[in-house]
Image (tube, grey):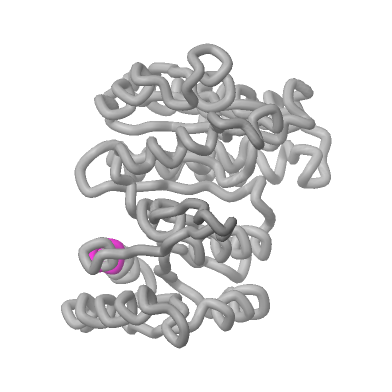
Amino acid sequence: MTVVCLPGDGVGPEVMQEARRALEALAPDLELEERVFGAQAIRETGDSLPDETLEACLAAEAVLKAPIGDPEFDAAEVRPEQGMLRLRAELDVYANLRPAHSESVDLLIVRELVGGLYFGARGVRDDGTVFDTMEYHPRQVERIARRALDLARSRRKGLLSVDKANVLETSRMWRRVVNEVAGEYDDVEVEHMLVDNAAMQLASVPERFDVLVTENLFGDILSDLAAAVTGGLGLAPSASLSDSGPGIFEPVHGSAPDIAGRSVANPTAMLRSTALMLEHGLGRPEEAGRLEQAVERAIASAPTRDLGGHATTSEFGDAVLRALS
């Protein structure tokens, strides 16, 4: 099995190194293939997603991606984020899983990832008006609803579909299709909620939720909120899945160029994303569980600065390896 590693920018190479160390200890049979991506790829090739990187990702069993981005390219014509959107589209990783858990919270947000505002028509009219278009086809809603219902069935059998059906035509279609698919899942309790109410409920009573499913923009916002109420973005992993090809597994946080190279970045989210890859991308739930437990032990024994401790990035990785041994 081949895993393409995209070390990315800023603190990306540092946290990726700890993920690679964990994988080499847990699954030494995996072939780890590193490719350039993001801001560093723009510097080297002029493209944030070079053809060679895309071809390697398409041929792999899974893609393990570190954060990308650099202020140097924030207003540039070619930006790292363009490569990220293209990679998601090329791999058709339409289902973004964002787990969030703490002592009292265990929820999973399932975000549709390749449709909506981020992929709709956009432009500038002659009068200076700027527009972005939210578009969804019923088939896109059907497949993300089915994925979310399957996941809810494997958990506590509760699904909340989040939309803005009182305003948006796309949301009215979304709600209709979710209800149609839900008819095949009599054992899952399905509820609908407007996105503004869902945000308030997530902030105040997150423990009430099991699985939430929503479109791209709402999912982007709500999943960061869920991360904030369960410990912060530094702890939050994600998995982006297709129906057939390789998935993309990456931490939620950014590249943090202000602390790059100082060995103070917390690799927890990168390591948890690696565990998601082992479970959902490579079919290795036992190794995934071992890594999750090792990360929890490292958080307790060798917390990094953001968690109130003093461990460096590599010292946290050392603690994970000790827990795995």
| Residue 319 covered by magenta stretch | no
Q: Is residue 127 left or right of residue 120?
A: right
The vertical placement of 286 against 317, above or below, is below
Looking at the image, which is closer to me, 225 or 167?
167
Percent x, y for residue 29? 32, 19
Say which residue appears at 27% left-offset and 29% top-offset.
58
Residue 64 in view, yes or no: yes
Say which residue appears at 29% left-offset and 68% top-offset.
145
Q: Is residue 153 left or right of residue 77?
A: left
The vertical placement of 202 against 230, above or below, is below
Give the magenta-colored segment's residue range.
142-146
Percent x, y for residue 38? 53, 27
Outermost left residue: 184
Q: Quadrant of residue 152?
A: bottom left
Residue 96 in view, yes or no: no
Looking at the image, which is closer to me, 287 or 82?
82
Q: Is residue 301 left or right of residue 236?
A: right
Which quadrant of the figure contains the N terminus? top left
Percent x, y for residue 153? 29, 70
Percent x, y for residue 303? 74, 40
